[in-house]
Image: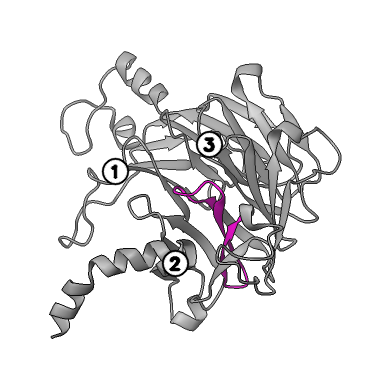
Amino acid sequence: MVNRIREFPQKSHIVATHTDSPEVFIWDVEAQPNRNAVLGAATSRPDLVLTGHKDNAEFALAMCPSEPFVLSGGKDKCVVLWSVHDHISTLAVEEPTVKQGSKSGGNTAKATENPTIGPRGIYKGHTDTVEDVQFCPSSAQEFCSVGDDSRLILWDARVGSVPVVKVDKAHNGDLHCVDWSPHDLNFILTGSADNTVHMFDRRKLKSSGVGSPVYKFEGHEAAVLCVQWSPDKASVFGSAAEDGILNIWDHEKVGKTTDSAGSKLSNTPPGLFFRHAGHRDKVVDFHWSASDPWTVVSVSDDCESSGGGGTLQIWRMMDLIYRPEEEVLTELDKFRSHIFGCNS
């Protein structure tokens, strides 16, 4: 079973997957055979296998924005880093292997094996399963991890395999997810089984002890499974949880009692300005659209209610929720004649 899939920012047709195994699989989706095209099509095989974990790695998986690096965490309590460049370097010095199905050569075992590479580094600092990992958006050498030990750890591969900062108690429960802001590299989000989202400033983090978040966001009624910053607005992010809700937050709204029009804000959790309640069970993952930043794709694990598989939804909140009313009305006014012409 595939638990998580991530694509390389440099080449969107190359993806990495986590399954119920210690390995990470790398796939070139353009080169893979279409198993539904014809009866008896070749079985899909990974183009590359990343080894290094000693136990299953199920969910913690991240791609580096600037380099072909892969980051993973698993039940072995380790964070593992690979570079796909290492595979390319290996191919350059190895003898060519026999392609599957070729009659020349006698090394049939080598021909059918998937190519593998070992890690560039293995990082130990967690005392329980690593649930999520994330690269710093500006550095291929800096990354962070969270786990079931309630720890948030910051790493820097340039200084070795020991934590740079290790916050022993970032939440009052297991940590399920983490995201590093692409707009302000000091801000990191974490989501937890304590039903909250915390926003940390890495300049204020200290090793050991209890973490002191800049903000705590309380709006879910079950464990938070995924957090992600908006690619469009620096202060906005989303959080998805086992309560089936996907919340959209703006940390700049925390502490404000009125909106931009002067109206009193409703009795909602501080920072919360939109709630998507269209799923029927826990929302396990979501992603903001890069081409239309206010469009979101989300997936839920509602196998029982949907009669088999989970559900994928693509949705967009109305413009008036996140844009000034005057701006929206002015834009609509430009299309008034076109709208009326279509309805006449």
| Residue 2 at least partly seen | no
Q: Quadrant of residue 221?
A: bottom right
**How far across and down, in percent of the image, does residue 171 sit?**
77, 52
Which segment is the magenta one? 228-250
Q: Residue furthest right?
A: 209
- Per the image, the residue denoted by label 3 is 71
State the residue in front, 208 or 256: 256
Residue type, numbered disc 3: Leu
Residue at image location 17% in from the left, 63% down from the top = 39
**How far across and down, in percent of the image, does residue 156 sit?**
63, 25
Q: Quadrant of residue 314?
A: bottom left
Mark 2 or 3 closer to N-term?
3
Circle 1: element type: loop
Quarter of the figure that contains the C terminus:
bottom left
The span from disc 1 to disc 2 (Cα, nearest Å) is: 40 Å
- Per the image, the residue denoted by label 1 is 13
**Colour scheme used in the picture?**
one colour
Mark 1 or 2 closer to N-term?
1
Mark 1 or 3 closer to N-term?
1
Circle 2: element type: helix
Foreground tag (2 vs 3)? 2
| Residue 284 at least partly seen | yes
- Per the image, the residue denoted by label 2 is 325
State the residue in front, 34 or 339: 339
**How far across and down, in percent of the image, does residue 239 sit?**
58, 60
Circle 3: element type: strand
Residue type, numbered disc 1: His
Is residue 180 placed above or below 216 in the rendered structure?
A: above
**Disc sitting over residue 283 in the figure:** none
Q: Are marks 1 and 3 in contact (CB under 8 Å)?
A: no
State the residue in front, 158 or 217: 217
